[in-house]
Image: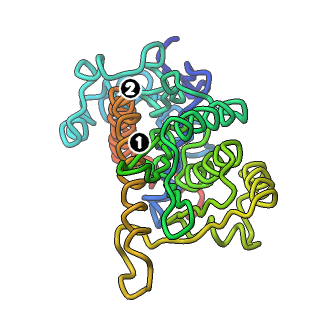
């Protein structure tokens, strides 16, 4: 792919653009500069070649800052001595960026901050076949370390956890199940993979897997403990996420077939004024710690990829801020030609 040097061409050398940092940049630039930010993100910035097409603008395609023959976007950003102070300000030099630019995407990235959409490292892509594998795995654990009764019931705690919960592309979730077996506290955990990575999904999957395994183990009076209030309210009939409707249907079907109970336990020892048995809180803490450990381990397995993505997105924002500085004066000229924004 050739560098974009013409007003009539936009450099696109990526199949799918990573739009997340572009949307974030626009959100951070809401206000008087949003229109310029939008133009920089969409490769519609006003360079000299483009302004030369405006009737009676008095401008030609040459760069007015250094008299280069073509005042293109690429020239103004990376070649023009008249914009060197902006490169100095943002500490951006073309030769220094060679090792940071995505392979086979140099033109689109350096000129438009368009990077290839991230492709996560291969991991478990879970479906209901995977959920069945989890059920079988926990069932084997129940048979090896059968849950013990306490106060005439069998109590089983479930929990979900996610690392980087606010960043969907690098978020990793896991779930856990905890139960007492004789004098032993037992836990069993699994990462969710890359299809569903939310805490909500992890919490629902945890109860579904635990209830299904308990049913197959012949545990007729299990009492499940969860610190996710949405699980309890969802089972009580509250509106649930459409994207997880199949999970909810499966969970409700198990609970209809059995005399299982599901109770809410305040997470992390909160709501101390509520009358919650200490045993419930301890079991919930055990499940919480196991889920957190599992999600941390799953996140660490893809940490190099996540770190590289985070750095690249930071560079996207840096290039776009630099681009806004470079084209601000020309944008103001562009506005005068049309009498405002």
Q: Name the residue under label 1.
A: 295
- Position of residue 96 in the picture relative to residue 26 (left or right): left
Residue at 45% of width from left, 39% of height from top?
Answer: 170
Is 198 placed above or below 116 here? below
Residue 48 numbered tag: none
Residue 108 relative to residue 96: left or right: right
Using a 10 Å C-alpha cutoff, classify the residue at mark 1 as few (fewer than 14 neighbours), some (14 to 19) or many (20 or more). Answer: many
**What residue is at 35 percent from the left and 35 percent from the top?**
297
Is 224 above or below relative to 304? below
| Residue placed furthest toward the bottom | 273
Q: Mark 2 points at which residue?
A: 75
In the rendered image, the quadrant that contains the C terminus is bottom right
Structural crowding at the residue carrying mark 2, measured as other residues with C-alpha within 10 Å and reported as few (<14), some (14–19) or many (≥20): many
Spot occupied by residue 20 in the image (x, y as percentages of width and height): 51, 43
Residue 194: x, y in percent?
A: 56, 34
Mark 1 or mark 2, earlier in chain: 2
Query: Where residue 203 appears, x then y in whole percent?
Result: 56, 54
Coordinates of residue 84 in the picture (x, y in percent): 22, 34
Q: Is residue 152 above or below residue 8?
A: below
What is the basis of the colouring in this image?
Answer: rainbow
Q: Nearer the viewer, residue 247 or 2?
A: 247
Q: Residue at 56%, 49% (x, y): give it.
A: 202
Q: Residue shown at 44%/85% (left/top)? A: 275
Hey, which quadrant is residue 128 in on the image? top right
Q: What element carries label 1?
A: helix
Label 1 and label 2: CA atoms lie apart by 46 Å
Asked whether, in this view, residue 57 is left or right of residue 65, the answer is: right
Please indicate, yes or no, whether residue 276 appears anywhere in the rendered image. yes
- Asked whether 194 or 142 is in front, the reply is 142
């Amino acid at each position: 792919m050739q560098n974009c040097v013409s007003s009539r061409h936009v450099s696109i050398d990526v199949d799918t653009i990573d739009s997340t940092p572009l949307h974030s940049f626009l959100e951070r630039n809401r206000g008087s500069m949003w229109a310029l930010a939008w133009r920089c993100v969409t490769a519609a910035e006003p360079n000299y070649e483009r302004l030369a097409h405006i009737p009676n603008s008095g401008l030609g395609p040459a760069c007015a800052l250094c008299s280069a023959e073509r005042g293109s976007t690429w020239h103004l950003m990376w070649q023009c001595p008249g914009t060197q102070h902006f490169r100095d300000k943002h500490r951006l030099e073309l030769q220094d960026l060679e090792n940071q630019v995505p392979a086979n995407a140099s033109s689109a990235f350096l000129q438009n901050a368009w990077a290839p959409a991230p492709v996560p490292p291969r991991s478990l892509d879970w479906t209901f076949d995977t959920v069945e594998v989890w059920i079988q795995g926990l069932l084997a654990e129940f048979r090896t370390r059968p849950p013990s009764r306490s106060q005439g019931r069998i109590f089983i705690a479930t929990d979900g956890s996610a690392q980087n919960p606010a960043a969907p592309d690098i978020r990793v979730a896991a779930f856990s199940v905890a139960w007492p077996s004789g004098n032993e506290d037992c836990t069993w955990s699994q990462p969710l993979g890359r299809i569903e990575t939310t805490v909500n999904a992890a919490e629902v999957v945890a109860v579904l897997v635990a209830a299904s395994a308990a049913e197959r183990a012949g545990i007729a009076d299990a009492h499940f403990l969860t610190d996710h209030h949405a699980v309890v309210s969802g089972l009580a009939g509250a509106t649930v996420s459409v994207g997880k409707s199949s999970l909810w249907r499966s969970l409700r079907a198990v609970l209809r077939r059995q005399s299982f109970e599901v109770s809410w336990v305040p997470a992390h020892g909160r709501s101390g004024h509520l009358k919650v048995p200490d045993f419930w809180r301890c079991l919930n803490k055990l499940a919480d710690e196991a889920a957190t450990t599992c999600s941390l381990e799953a996140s660490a397995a893809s940490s190099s990829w996540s770190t590289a993505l985070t750095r690249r997105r930071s560079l996207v924002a840096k290039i776009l801020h630099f681009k806004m500085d470079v084209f601000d004066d020309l944008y103001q000229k562009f506005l005068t030609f049309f009498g405002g924004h």
